[in-house]
Amino acid sequence: MGIISIILLVIFVIAALLLILLVALQSDGSSGLGGVFGGGSDSTFGGQGSKVLTKITAIVGGSFLVIALLLAVINKGPGADTLLDSVTNDQVQETTEWWNDAAEAPQE
């Protein structure tokens, strides 16, 4: 795992936690967690607070998705292209021996 992958992973976790916090702070008609800070007020961060929180949530959500895709591309291992390419000859030989042993067994 390279240094870039580790940095992206840390940013990814921070973005996930921040996204959870931002979604919890937004009030959708009810008080939500926004009421914890100010009581019965409709807006936690002033009159334009909901617009700001919505924009910040969209930015953090978009960055979360982009970072997730980057991590998937960076951490993709140099594996086989197909499932059949990943099967080794030993596995095939063991399977064939088992099948042949069962077929050659004398029936009583």
Image: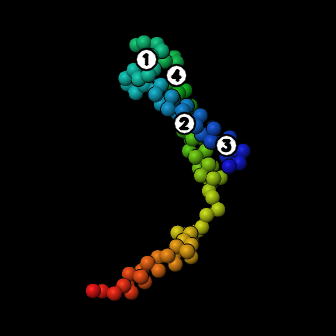
Distance from disc 3 to disc 1, alpha carbons, whole Å, reads 36 Å
Q: Earlier in the sequence, mark 2 or mark 4?
A: 2
Along the horizontal axis of the image, is 35 left or right of 72?
Answer: left
Do the residues under discs 3 and 4 have CB atoms within 8 angstroms? no
Q: Earlier in the sequence, mark 3 or mark 1?
A: 3
Residue 49 marker: 4
Residue under numbered circle 3: 6
Q: Position of residue 103 (x, y in %)?
A: 37, 85
Which residue is most to the right?
A: 3
Write down the quadrant of residue 15 in the picture. top right
The answer to whether the residue labelled 3 contacts the one labelled 1, judged by CB atoms less than 8 Å apart, is no
Q: Earlier in the sequence, mark 4 or mark 1?
A: 1
* Kind of residue indicated by mark 2: Ala
Which residue is identified by label 2? 16
Gap between marks 3 and 2 measured at Cα: 15 Å
Residues at discs 2 and 4 in contact (Cβ within 8 Å): no
Q: Amino acid at mark 3?
A: Ile
Indicate which label's residue lies in the foreground, 2 or 4: 2
